[in-house]
Image (cartoon, grey):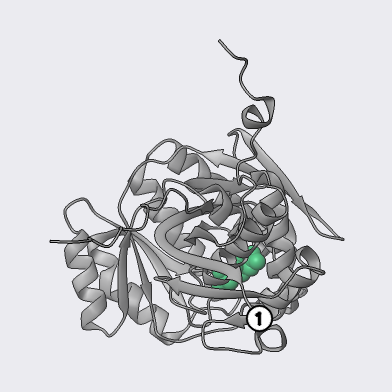
Amino acid sequence: MTDPNPAEMSEPDIPARSFPLSARAPGKCILFGEHAVVHGRPELLLAIDLYTQVTARRAERYRLNADTDPLSRNPYLARSISEHWKNGPPLEFRVSTRIPKAAGLGSSAAFSADLGAILGSANGGVDRPTLAQTAFSIEQGAQGVGSPGDTSAVVAGGVLSVNGGKGTLLWSVADAAASWKVRRVRDPNWSWLVAYSGIPRNTGATVRRVGERLAAPDGPALLEQFAQVADEGIAAVEAEDRERVGRLMRRNHELLREVGVSHPRLEELIAAVEDVCEGAKLTGAGAGGSIVALPRPGRELEAARRITRVGGVAFPVRAAASGATLVEGTAPPVTPATGP
Ligand code: PMV
């Protein structure tokens, strides 16, 4: 019997491969603690089973779908290349996604994680904690502000907490000013509903606006309330207490309204589903974007129908089983039949 190959034994989570390469990452929604997490408070996130897939291959010049000058137009790609492929040959990227853009559902985090996974693989492989840090610096470099919650969720998959909870520590992610601890939370395996209002928004501008609001004299007290709701929310999900989770979602939404990031369309979506759901709230930066709701068992379809009736885009989702991965093992090409 031959000894196992030590290189194979220590293959990183995202293994070394050569081009063409393809990576897939889920979207995310925030169950508790958005905005407050930027200020170091706890957050609970769910990676959702809507995915973005990116394929990359060598080319004569850089290209991103139809864009032949993407490095000057797409800050996520520009940042990825300048940090992880500086002297590499040009690449052509194709992106396919089910995550609506600028909707607060993690499209930019998933794109950043896919780019990090592809370039990490081409550079010799990368472990998940490093990929979480890479995806965060790509996203933060492009947006200018924010926490590593979104990018950690799409790299980890499942349910996870930031700066809270008692689960296994997955990794810590830092920027120049702060560091956040990311932990695993057991997935209660519930059906959730996310719904896009159709109103795009800008995360950076909204985060800055909330930062100004929290600088007011009642800011610290508000932040403490955000933290308390998120801590209790993490415990309620761990205890699989649906009713308590719903109540805390409603409370978290009130706080988000208080810091000025709700929107009439979000209020309309929430009102449309509230009596068939345990709770509902805006998710992500707000000021447009999306809501997340926890439908009562058996009322999932009715909740989705009500969203459609008021003009929202409903996505029934569950926790994504896995985070960002390389898409490998495609079927070998079909050999054209020869002869009769
Ligand atoms: O980009 P969005 O809508 O998913 O917002 C992210 C959540 C914030 O807490 C508002 C910002 C952040 O980076 O954590």
Residue 2 percent across, percent down from the top left = 59, 14
- Horizontal side of 226 relative to 51 (left or right) equals right
- Horizontal side of 179 relative to 168 (left or right) equals right
Location of residue 111 by image quarter: bottom right
Residue 240 percent across, percent down from the top left = 38, 39
The yes-or-no answer for disc 1 within 8 Å of ligand 1 is no
- Residue 145 seen in this snapshot: no
The residue at the far front in this view is 339
The residue at the far top in this view is 1
225 or 266: nearer the viewer: 266
The residue at the far left in this view is 340
Query: Residue at 47% of width from left, 65% of height from top?
Result: 53
Say which amino acid is labelled 1. Glu
How many numbered marks appear?
1
30 or 137: nearer the viewer: 137
Location of residue 1 by image quarter: top right
Residue 292 percent across, percent down from the top left = 40, 65
Numbered disc 1: secondary structure:
loop
- Residue 298 seen in this snapshot: yes
15 or 270: nearer the viewer: 15
Q: Quadrant of the C terminus?
A: bottom left
- Horizontal side of 91 relative to 238 (left or right) equals right
* Ligand 1 found in image quarter: bottom right
165 or 147: nearer the viewer: 147
Residue 140 percent across, percent down from the top left = 72, 69
Relative to 22, residue 145 above or below: below
- Which residue is labeled 1 in the image? 60
Relative to 142, residue 151 above or below: above
Relative to 56, residue 196 above or below: below
